[in-house]
Image (cartoon, rainbow, N blue to C red):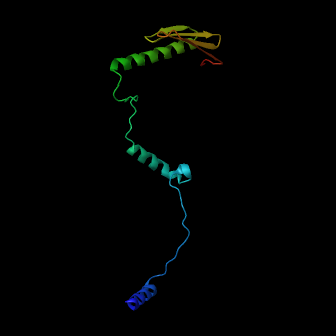
Amino acid sequence: MSIFFRKAALIALIVSPSVYSSELVYTPVNPSFGGNALNSSHLFNHANAINDYEDPSARDIFDEQESALDRLASSLESRLISQLLADVGNGNTGQLETDDFFLNIVDDSGTLLVQIVDKATGESTEISVSGLNPDL
């Protein structure tokens, strides 16, 4: 039997193709450790796909939609503030009172003074902007 195995091994060595080898080179995948930067989005998406943690304090923006009345009130407030600022540019002063805050705008010889008072807390913020040139 040993002659049979010797002949089989000799035939296998003669018939088998040549085998080449080279150094084993490690290339990292994660870009944080020197890998290809193009892998970052794939790794991030994969991590998010297997993450089953949900933040209990996170709120879904689609659950709390503004009503039409809230959107109208917000739009009117924005329009009134815009008109108030335009009037101040013409030399007028103005005030605006909403449910949440009190706004006082004064043009003091080229310096725009804006005072905002929060009705809930009573906190006051003053903004002073100088160097504004009115539109001619």
Which residue lies at the image location 45% right of the left edge and 85% below the top edge?
13
Image coords of residue 1 (percent x, y): 37, 89
Which residue lies at the image location 46% right of the left edge and 14% below the top edge?
80
Res. 130 image quadrant: top right
Image coords of residue 53 (percent x, y): 39, 38
| Residue 31 vs residue 21, the one in the foreground | 21
Which residue lies at the image location 53% right of the left edge and 15% below the top edge?
85
Which residue lies at the image location 45% right of the left edge and 46% below the top edge?
44
Residue found farthest to the front: 1
The C terminus: image quadrant: top right
Residue 18 located left or right of residue 54 = right
| Residue 16 vs residue 7, the one in the foreground | 7
| Count of marks overlaid on the render | 0
Say above or below: 119 vs 35: above
Say above or below: 41 vs 63: below
Res. 132 image quadrant: top right
Image coords of residue 133 (percent x, y): 63, 19
| Residue 19 vs residue 88, the one in the foreground | 19
Image coords of residue 39 (percent x, y): 48, 52
